Image: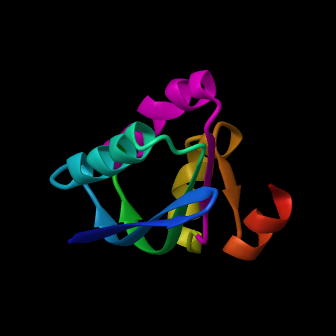
């Protein structure tokens, strides 16, 4: 099960993920990211603190937007990933393509 929440904290759009992302609900993730882009987001932060699992379908959603983010100058950062979910990103080398930070405080300091 997955619950998503979009919070606007100027100048950021924060997408909070709770639960698990798999093939059955990855469309919800896709819709949320598309909504933030359509809403003019210049900075998208994904709070993965309560994300317990992500499938290849969920990872694919993030990957499918990387070119869009770059083309539109959107900062995209994921933070708060637990060790097991972070390991999935590292194994696939996605930590080299996506900015991943330990927590929100670090993100705010860095950008």
Could you say which is closer to the camera, residue 1 or residue 90? 1
Q: Is residue 60 above or below residue 86?
A: above
On the question of residue 42 being in view, the answer is yes
Instruction: Decide whether the magenta segment is chiefly helix, strand or loop.
Output: helix
Residue 78 located within the stretch drawn in magenta:
yes
Asked whether, in this view, residue 1 is left or right of residue 67, the answer is: left
* Drawn side of residue 33 relative to residue 100, left or right: left
Q: Is residue 76 above or below residue 47?
A: above
Q: Position of residue 57 (x, y in %)?
A: 30, 43
Residue drawn where x is 74% and y is 64% of the image: 107
Instruction: Give the residue at x 50% y 68%.
Output: 48
Q: Residue at x 61, y 62 (%)?
A: 10
Q: Nearer the viewer, residue 1 or 11?
A: 11
Quadrant containing the C terminus is bottom right
What is the count of numbered marks? Answer: 0
The answer to whether 60 appears left or right of 105 in the picture is left
In this view of the protein, can residue 103 be seen by the observer?
A: no
| Relative image position of residue 101 (x, y in whole percent) | 71, 62
| Colour pattern | rainbow
Residue 76 percent location from the top left of the image: 61, 46
Instruction: Please provide the residue range marked out in magenta.
Output: 57-80
Q: Residue furthest right?
A: 109
Q: Quadrant of the N terminus?
A: bottom left
Compared to residue 36, the image places residue 54 above or below, namely below
Position of residue 86 measured from the top left corner of the image (x, y, whole percent): 58, 62
Q: Is residue 65 magenta?
A: yes
Q: Is residue 29 above or below residue 17?
A: above
């Amino acid at each position: 099960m997955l619950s998503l929440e979009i919070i606007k904290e100027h100048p950021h759009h924060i997408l909070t993920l709770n639960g698990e992302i798999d093939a059955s609900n990855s469309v919800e993730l896709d819709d949320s990211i598309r909504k933030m882009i359509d809403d003019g987001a210049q900075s998208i932060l994904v709070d993965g603190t309560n994300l317990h699992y992500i499938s290849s379908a969920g990872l694919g959603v993030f990957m499918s937007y990387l070119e869009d983010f770059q083309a539109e100058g959107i900062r995209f950062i994921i933070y708060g990933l637990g060790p097991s979910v972070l390991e999935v990103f590292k194994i696939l080398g996605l930590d080299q393509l996506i900015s991943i930070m330990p927590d929100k405080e670090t993100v705010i300091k860095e950008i």
